[in-house]
Amino acid sequence: MPDDVVFWVLAVPAVASGAMVFRYDSMARATYALLLSLLCVGGLVIRLGLDYLGVVVILMMTIEMALMAVFMVMFMMNPAGLLPMSMVHNKRGAAAVSAAVFVLLAAGIVLAPWPGRRGKPDADPTMALGESLMGPHMLTMMTLGLALFTTIVATVVLATGRGRYDRFGDDLCARRPADPVRPGARR
Amino acid sequence: MTLEPLLLVAAALFCVGLFGALSQQSVVMLMMGLELMLGGVILAAAAVWHFVAPAATDGQVLVVLAVTVMAVEMAVGFAVVTALFRTREVDMTDDAAELKG
Amino acid sequence: MADTAPVWAVVLLPFALAAAAVLVAGFDAVLAAAAEGGRPGRPLRAAPAPLRAGLRLLGQQPRRTTAGDPWLGRIGIALVPVAAVLAGAVLPWGFRAVTDPVVGVVWFNAMEALAWAAVWLAGWGPNSALSLVGGYRFLAQGLAYELPHMLALTTAALGAESLRVGEVVAGQRGLWFAVWMPVAFAVFLLSALAMAFWGPFDHPLGRDAAGGAAAEYAGVDRLVLLAGRWLLLVVTAGFSVPLFLGGGHGPWLPAWAWTLLKTAAVLGLLVAGRRLLPTLRMERYVEFAWTVLVPLTLLQALAVAIVVLER
């Protein structure tokens, strides 16, 4: 019984605030509605017995959304939503597609003969996860690590506006890079 | 808690995110839709792990994968928007359609 | 080893943390009065100053700004003390914490990450440029301190081979982690200050931005924000005791007394130490954190991992 209460208390805000993301005019509100939705997802994951992953979802999403808000405010023309605005295309088509997908998924979920619970979880699921990531799932872990490293390099290359020609001159001969802020402790 | 309601919630999150990803013009809003979809994936993976195969760790690995994809998607998305904005002063998907064949 | 405290501890926890915060704020006020000079014995009279200031704020009218988003601002303000108390739930007093979850260390980290959202929201709420500047500054500061901080937490958990705070304490029965993980300990103390946006890291509330994120708040709003900041400082500094200073381990005295003594020592060090340093600008700290602290903490984690493997 308390399990059900927890489920509803987390599930309803998760979906409701997820929907509010696309209804708010204020970008700050939209971002933090998304954060609330993802925090509820993290709470549900904890309730399912995955303590570590649930808390990691909470930790990551908090930081991610805090940073996302910066970009929202930076790029949107009307970040505080003080003027009502709508920036959508093909709203009706999108609604139809997502409703159809939901009906399809729901039908599959309700009609599928789900197998019963096989086996019991490890005493410490976190330990089991770590051992499988460092054992049989090592390839997954290595791929993830490589992907993250590639992401770091790629995002810096994409986002920086200044290449080496800007810093060291056209013939790359400048002795000191012409950076707007001098690096090092001697500023 | 049972499996089906959890999966329905996950499907609802996924579809709300899908609606956002399809309908929003701003790249940043579009990415919020993607995040919501991945949130649904995380919930579904955790639910299936708990109710179907708790002895194996595959469900947990899937959650790790989804969380990583979220981080990568965020970082690359913002980098692309920044690059786009720097050169063209736009952040809308419709204005960035010149790669269309 | 670490037992869970009885239920009434849940009710007691916020009050205990608040009392500690008032004491620390009083100590800070005494130091401030002493720094201004005056006759001997005089500075001690400044000890109740924080209480007086708090009461004065209670009577003050909250300020309203045009076209602000007061709801988001209030959520941000309230989140600061809430995050501190939630993080404090895994803080063991002696060997007992209010709760001792399996992933206590990660829980602590997740709760203090709420401060990122909190300060930015508090800065966003009043629709004021200077307070938004403060909010942005805290995000930049967060990017600087969080990575070395996480590595320091990881190092302590690695040394105990557990994410449970109780077992981290138990792992230091013979030797404190601060002794063989000095880099992680020092980094943790730095980031404890940065997390509570306090001391040399008070740029988000800096005087050059007219008070930064707190600029537009008066009355109860301001009281909750500033008191929450003290709570955050107490909790983060207090967490260095179970992580690095052996928790309740110590000769002769009971465990709770050792916890109290060590926490007081760390807080005293931080409060007195901040007077020696000027406010640090964030771009400098980012550079220092990423080029010096991250490699150092990585090496520290490597050394600890080798020790753990060999033992």
Image: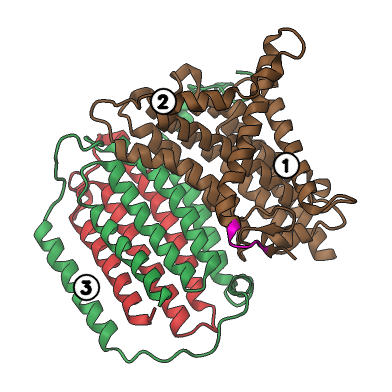
Q: Which amino acid does label 2 sit on?
A: Gly
10 Å crowding of disc 2: few (<14), some (14-19), many (20+) = few
Residue C250 placed where, x, y %? 86, 51
Up-down relation of residue A21 to residue C7 (above or below): above
Image depth: mark 3 or mark 2 in front: 2
Q: What residue type is labelled 1?
A: Thr
- Location of residue B88 (image quadrant): top left
Rendered hue of chain A is green
Image depth: mark 3 or mark 1 in front: 1
**Quarter placement of the N terminus of chain C:** bottom right
User: How is colour applied across the structure in the image?
Assistant: by chain
Up-down relation of residue C17 to residue C302 (above or below): above
Please tell me whether residue C6 belongs to the stretch shown in magenta: yes
Does residue A20 appear in this view? yes
Q: What residue type is labelled 3?
A: Phe
The answer to whether B15 appears left or right of C100 in the picture is left
* Residue drawn 57% across the image and 21% down it: A176
Point out the stretch of residues depicted in magenta.
Answer: C4-8
Residue B54 placed where, x, y %? 51, 82
Q: Distance between the residues labelled 3 and 1?
A: 53 Å
Up-down relation of residue C24 to residue A5 (above or below): above
Which residue was labeled with disc 1? Answer: C263
Q: Distance between the residues labelled 1 and 2?
A: 32 Å
The answer to whether A56 appears left or right of C35 in the picture is left
Image depth: mark 1 or mark 2 in front: 2
Which residue was labeled with disc 2? Answer: C59
Rendered hue of chain B is red
* Residue drawn 48% across the image and 54% down it: A60
* Residue drawn 50% across the image and 31% down it: C226
Q: Camera-side residue: C237 or C143? A: C237
Residue C122 placed where, x, y %? 40, 35
Residue C304 placed where, x, y %? 77, 55
